[in-house]
Image: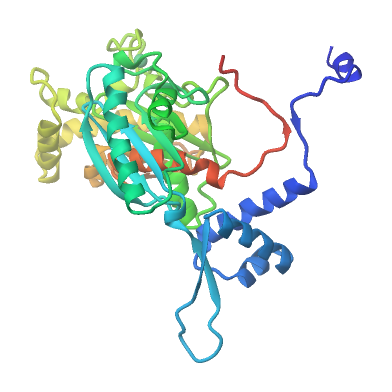
Amino acid sequence: MSSSKAATGFALPIRTATPSSVRAVNRSIVLELIRRRQPVSRADLARFTGIFRSSVSDIVDELIEDGFVLEQRAIPSQRGRVPMILRLHDAGYPVLGLTIRPAYCQIARAGLNGRIHKSLTLPVPASPKKLVQCLADAIRKWCQESVAAGAPEFRRIGIAVPGHVDAPAGRILWSPTHAELAGFPIASEIFERTGIETLADNDCNLGALSELSLGKMENKDHAANFILLNVSDFGAGAGAVLNGEIYLGHDANFAAEVGHMVIAPDGLRCRCGRRGCWELYVSNEASWRRLHPRTPFTIERFNQMLAAAHSGEKRTLAAFRETARYLSLGISNIGFLFNPAEVIVAGRITAIWDVLRADLASLYGAAQLRYSIRPARLSADDSLLHGAVCLALRDAFAKPKFGEMLAVETA
Ligand SMILES: [Zn+2]
């Protein structure tokens, strides 16, 4: 079939390398090096990469022209010639990140370095249309401020969604905390109202993207295989970074949804319709219910429980140790599945890391499991919001890919 197509002139979706793609690859390498090594000189870039100085200069000139890079004179430290240094042009590529949380949503603006300059918390209206309206109003206000200040227009918006997302299509498939958003094409709806290209993905994937980006900034190249586990108030989810990229799964809908690993076939009934899913035993609500089975969970009450654990209250510590036991069970399963270098835990529960740390690694440890388990660099909210910003910046730093295009079916 394929040979007859080839014989009659049908082109397969194969992206081949051309002279111009060599330059595109080198451009992405140079931009990434400037991001990681800034401030850096043209001579340093030529030395680091082995690319001819003239080719480096051509690429740098193009990056400056496109607004990605700034060249400035270094601050002189001694007499003599003061070199020119390169940095990312933070303000040259402004982006927005949005997160939808169970009780509120957040919006942040950032530049090419990915650092959040300003953020805002908004309520989540009950209907998808009102949610989009509310977000679009806030975005338009910031756009007007940017225009008034003479700043460039926002280039991209990234959205972190709690639940399953068809990431290539930017459509929410299912959200455990926002049933009204099922099937909602949030990326195209935001684009229609703002004119800004918009991308959406699962929030735990974006928490993982945040850790990947922060690891790169710290030049931790070994951090290419890790799992970001977000222990949230009502569930647990994860993002898997494998070989330096977010693993999306075959249809990009719900890879690494570890919260729904069944660990007790006759256990508690889950929102997904099955019994004994892991998140029912490790969420913040699960920890709360161990101690207070008849009092509804609230964030304030849970924060008091964390404070009681801090002060060494015995029953509270016992409840959290039970959570740690279940966390250890699931984390070891994750370890055997992915062989990660790190399992990174995000969520309010990391406030009592000293209480959890030893049990997480040891209770279901095994000689083969040699990952490290550590808390996320940022709080859960900040991690997801920063991840949404990283999604908005993804195309700016993307490397060209070659070979057969295994496009995900989005129809
Ligand atoms: Zn489930």
- Could you say where residue 88 lies in the image, as x and y percent from the top left? 49, 59
Q: Going 36% across and 9% down the picture, which residue do you hit?
A: 274
Looking at the image, residue 134 sits to the left or right of residue 68; the answer is: left
Q: Is residue 275 above or below residue 368?
A: above
Q: Going 55% across and 19% down the picture, which residue do you hit?
A: 251
The N terminus lies in which quarter of the figure?
A: top right
Q: Going 72% across and 62% down the picture, which residue do you hit?
A: 55
- Could you say where residue 171 lies in the image, as x and y percent from the top left? 44, 20
- Number of callouts in the render? 0
**Which image quadrant is residue 32 in?**
bottom right
**Which image quadrant is residue 80 in?**
bottom right
Q: Is residue 292 above or below residue 344?
A: above
Q: Going 26% across and 16% down the picture, which residue do you hit?
A: 127
Nearer to me, 252 or 368: 252
Q: Is residue 49 above or below residue 350?
A: below
**Which image quadrant is residue 179 in?**
top left
The C terminus lies in which quarter of the figure?
A: top right
Q: Residue furthest right?
A: 7
Looking at the image, residue 255 sits to the left or right of residue 128; the answer is: right
* Rendered image coloring scheme: rainbow
- Could you say where residue 60 lies in the image, as x and y percent from the top left? 62, 61
- Could you say where residue 309 lies in the image, as x and y percent from the top left? 14, 40
Image quarter for ligand 1 equals: top left
Nearer to me, 190 or 144: 144
Answer whether residue 326 is visible to the viewer in this image: yes
Looking at the image, residue 303 sits to the left or right of residue 17; the answer is: left
Answer whether residue 100 is visible to the viewer in this image: no
